[in-house]
């Protein structure tokens, strides 16, 4: 069991590093790393360096002389040189260690992926490469020599020199070790260049395996768009002569912002119309932007310690969301982001893993790369921007970059910048960073007909979360508008600032009682409790000028019907009718209509039922959702069928928002229509489609009907050699299969020789795919829980990080019935009982079961 680290225990490192030199001679089993680190004392104490058990240490010297054994202590985790053995002036610590990249299946530190040497050092991977102060507040310039006979040798910064079998790199910008990277492989690049706002020329490369070269062009375009956007929107210019991106197949996360050398999961780089969906393209564009934006928010200004992770991640997610909103549709992007936030972060906040965006304790930092740190961290910045206004936000960010460039900062530094730039007191606002849990906002309306006055009485409450029983009131920006009964907007958006537990806001001079359009643009990450008739919701769905609130009204209508149906009730005709209005409205953006047509997912329905104080029944929820889809299809068959034909996108494929939106509406219609036509349209779309978006839309519909045999066989025949496409093959089947078929289907897939489960993408596709099939994972006989737990037991010793992350599929277990709870608990306890259980997974299971 790892020890708990506390934010309150922070103390500065007693040395500054003036420069770090590395000389790395690569070999699969015996890579030799020679380091020379120039230290300068800034405080008292011995020299303590981090390093892992995987380091075979050959020598340790100070200023060239071996350190006397009496002054040197090495444990599995640290190397300590006693104060007595350290000179008073600056000194050079040098070590030579040997490491084994081939044996590194945890994919942390230096490892091999398909013959490519690569690194992942965030958060604490550098200590698996050599002895070092592996903490983000120790920043240094790096000079690195890479030796290997592989053709492409890369590290951070600018290339200095190269020769036969070696290359030297220099990164002049001081950085923490977590931003170090090194790559060597037989790679080919799509290359281009970019002229920055001040006229400097930057060489750009996207490095991939030679066979993948024809699928790297889109990533390059996304990079150039991102670089220009950061100049225009934030005034941020790139600061090196080269920017390299490398795609590797084995990667625990999405991608990594190493200075000047971003390393990506290949699924977030490679795209062609035949192999990637519209959603893949959008995600690639967003993640390329995200990692690029880290160059300023993360790299030039980094985190003092890992408790501050949301300082860089929340801000960088916020920036990538702004970017996507700008280059695609802002309205659609906001709705998509809210759907993701609720599906992942609200879920986390409501369960045993709830933690604040800035946690104050952790055992294993890799377990805190969460939806709360990332997505809620971004929401908090959105609220801040709404409160200080666009101009205040811009002034604050300018001051942030000015004041803190080159530093390792805290959330306090960040908030101080806003206070200084805008004069606002943010003491209460800070709770959003330090307190866990999703506030529930309750609205009661009081209409005074005589006075023409509407009073909105808001109250807020946040349920206790682990370790935080009491939740004081937060400042909540509530954007509202008023819509008349005949659909006119009588009050445009106004932001109410709620600061108390209960608070009234009045609106005068109203001729008749309006409908309140609440939480426009999703102005705060809260849940809403209000009484509203279905007719009022239908008015908002038909007329609201705020597209988020408009979508929300439709979503609420669907949810109410689903919850009622899961309890044996029936669909509300007001909803069916209102939906018809949306289908007929040709002025609406097809992508928006597609979002309105997408019914709440089964997990979201279960969460809603739990919120309303009942126990969700996964089978009943599945049936209700099927039944609603079938009813909507029957009711609107003509409209949907017309839409399906009208939304066909002619001509060559383009991943842009316009055509992608039409395809998403077409596929949403297909999803409903396939409930009526036995899969005829889906089969014919599968047969004729030229792009992966339509193929996957058709395939999912066929799998749901259990009629996908021929399509799957064809997919395998054509794409058997393409790992990314085969990941889709492995995920769509367990995910979309009828619940009773899902575990057998997944078990059969797990037997295939190409189920390379040590590859995180492949593991997540199959095991994660099954866990995403709500009624299958929560099957009453416990087979879903057991299937996933068995695989986690197998993965944990090989790759603890990815195993630990996937335990979160169990985080909702407390919301189900006693029988399911007992089965989930038993599965988790089997996992917890593994004698060799990793610290990563151990922490997660303990927290989930607490
Ligand atoms: N900083 C990376 C990003 O946000 C994530 C890397 C996290 N890696 C990890 N092993 N926890 O893009
Ligand atoms: Zn990030």
Image (cartoon, rainbow, N blue to C red):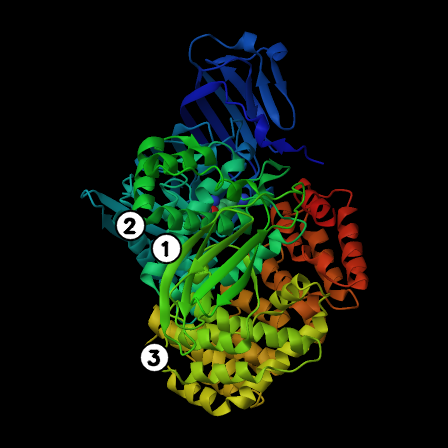
Q: Quadrant of residue 543?
A: bottom left
Q: Quadrant of residue 67?
A: top right
* Residue 14 image point, x, y percent: 50, 18
* Residue 447 image point, x, y percent: 49, 67
Point 52% across, 71% down: residue: 555
Element under disc 3: loop
Residues at marks 1 and 2, CA–CA distance in whole angstroms: 9 Å
Residues at marks 1 and 3, CA–CA distance in whole angstroms: 25 Å
* Residue 525 image point, x, y percent: 51, 54
In the rendered image, the quadrant that contains the N terminus is: top right
Residue under numbered circle 3: 587
Is disc 3's CB within 8 Å of ligand 2?
no
Mark 2 is surrounded, within 10 Å at the Cα level, by few (under 14), some (14 to 19) or many (20 or more) other residues, namely few
Instruction: State which tag comes first along the sequence, 2 or 3.
Output: 2
Q: Quadrant of residue 425?
A: top left
In the rendered image, the residue lying farthest to the front is 450
Vertically, is 34 above or below 683?
A: above
State the count of labels.
3
Please report contact status of discs 1 and 2: CB closer than 8 Å, yes or no.
Answer: yes
Mark 1 is surrounded, within 10 Å at the Cα level, by few (under 14), some (14 to 19) or many (20 or more) other residues, namely some
Vertically, is 380 above or below 574?
A: above
Residue under numbered circle 1: 322
Q: Mark 2 against mark 3, which lies toward the viewer?
A: 3
Residue under numbered circle 2: 233
- Residue 252 visible in this rendered orientation of the protein: no
């Amino acid at each position: 069991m790892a020890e708990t680290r506390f934010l309150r225990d922070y103390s500065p490192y007693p040395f500054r590093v003036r420069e770090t030199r590395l000389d790395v001679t690569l070999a699969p089993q015996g890579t030799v790393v020679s380091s020379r680190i120039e230290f300068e004392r800034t405080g008292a104490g011995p020299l303590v360096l981090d390093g892992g058990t995987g380091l075979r240490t050959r020598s340790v010297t100070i200023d060239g002389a071996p350190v006397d054994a009496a002054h040197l202590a090495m444990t599995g985790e640290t190397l300590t040189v006693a104060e007595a053995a350290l000179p008073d002036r600056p000194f050079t610590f040098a070590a030579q260690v040997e490491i084994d990249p081939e044996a590194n299946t945890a994919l942390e530190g230096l490892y091999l992926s398909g013959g490519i040497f690569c690194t992942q050092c965030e958060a604490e991977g550098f200590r698996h490469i050599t002895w070092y102060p592996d903490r983000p507040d120790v920043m240094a310039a790096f000079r690195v020599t890479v030796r290997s006979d592989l053709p492409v040798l890369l590290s951070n910064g600018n290339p200095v020199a190269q020769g036969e079998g070696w290359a030297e790199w220099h990164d002049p910008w001081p950085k923490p070790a977590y931003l170090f990277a090194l790559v060597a492989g037989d790679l080919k690049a799509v290359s281009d260049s970019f002229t920055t706002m001040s006229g400097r020329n930057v060489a750009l490369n996207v490095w991939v395996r030679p066979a993948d070269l024809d699928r790297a062009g889109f990533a390059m375009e996304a990079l150039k768009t991102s670089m220009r956007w950061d100049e225009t929107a934030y005034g941020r210019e790139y600061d090196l002569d080269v920017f390299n991106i490398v795609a590797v197949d084995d990667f625990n996360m999405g991608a990594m912002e190493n200075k000047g050398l971003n390393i990506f999961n290949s699924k977030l780089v490679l795209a062609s119309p035949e192999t990637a969906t519209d959603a893949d393209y959008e995600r690639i564009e967003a993640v390329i932007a995200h990692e690029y934006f880290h160059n300023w928010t993360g790299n030039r200004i980094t985190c003092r310690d890992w408790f501050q992770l949301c300082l860089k991640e929340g801000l960088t997610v916020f920036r990538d969301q702004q970017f996507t909103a700008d280059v695609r549709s802002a309205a659609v992007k906001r709705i998509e982001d809210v759907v993701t936030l609720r599906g992942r972060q609200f879920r986390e906040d409501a369960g045993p893993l709830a933690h604040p965006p800035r946690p104050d304790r952790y055992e294993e930092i890799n377990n805190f790369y969460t939806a709360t740190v990332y997505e809620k961290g971004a929401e908090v910045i959105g609220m801040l921007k709404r409160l200080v206004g666009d101009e205040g936000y811009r002034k604050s960010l300018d001051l942030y970059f000015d004041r803190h460039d080159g530093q390792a900062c805290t959330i306090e530094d960040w908030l101080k910048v806003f206070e200084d730039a805008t004069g606002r007191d943010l003491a209460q606002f800070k709770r959003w960073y330090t307190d866990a849990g999703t506030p529930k906002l309750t609205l009661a309306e009081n209409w005074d007909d005589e006075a023409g006055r509407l009073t909105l009485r808001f109250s807020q409450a946040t349920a206790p979360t682990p370790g935080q029983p009491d939740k004081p009131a937060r400042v909540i920006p509530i954007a509202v508008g008023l819509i008349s009964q005949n659909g006119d907007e009588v009050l445009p958006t106004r932001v109410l600032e709620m600061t108390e537990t209960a608070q009234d806001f009045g609106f005068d001079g109203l001729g008749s009682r309006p409908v309140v359009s609440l939480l426009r643009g999703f102005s705060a990450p809260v849940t809403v409790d209000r009484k509203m008739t279905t007719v009022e919701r239908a008015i908002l769905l038909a007329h609201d000028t705020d597209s988020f609130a408009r979508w929300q009204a439709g979503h609420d209508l669907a949810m109410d019907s689903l919850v009622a149906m899961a309890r044996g009730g029936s669909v509300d005709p007001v909803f069916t009718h209102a939906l018809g209005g949306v289908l007929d409205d040709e002025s609406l953006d097809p992508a928006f209509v597609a979002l309105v047509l997408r019914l709440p997912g089964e997990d979201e329905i279960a969460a809603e039922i739990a919120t309303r104080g009942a126990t969700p029944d996964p089978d009943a929820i599945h049936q209700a959702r099927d039944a609603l889809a079938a009813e909507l299809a029957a009711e609107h068959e003509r409209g949907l069928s017309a839409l399906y034909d009208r939304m066909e996108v002619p001509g060559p494929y383009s991943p842009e928002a316009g055509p992608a939106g039409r395809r998403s509406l077409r596929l949403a219609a297909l999803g409903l229509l396939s409930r009526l036509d036995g899969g005829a349209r889906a089969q014919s779309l599968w047969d004729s489609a030229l792009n992966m978006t339509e193929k996957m839309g058709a395939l999912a519909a066929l799998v749901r009907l259990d009629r996908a045999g021929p399509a799957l066989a064809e997919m395998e025949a054509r794409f058997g050699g393409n790992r990314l496409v085969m990941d889709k093959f492995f995920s769509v089947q367990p995910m979309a299969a009828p619940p009773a078929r899902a575990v057998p289907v997944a078990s059969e897939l797990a037997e295939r020789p190409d189920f390379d489960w040590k590859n995180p993408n492949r593991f997540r596709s199959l095991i994660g795919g099954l866990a995403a099939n709500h009624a299958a994972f929560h099957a009453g006989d416990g087979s879903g829980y057991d299937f996933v737990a068995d695989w986690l037991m197998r993965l944990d010793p090989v790759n603890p990080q990815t195993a630990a992350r996937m335990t979160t599929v169990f985080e909702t277990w407390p919301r189900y019935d006693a029988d399911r709870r007992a089965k989930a608990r038993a599965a988790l306890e089997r996992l917890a009982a593994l004698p060799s259980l990793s610290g990563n997974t151990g922490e997660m299971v303990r927290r989930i079961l607490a």
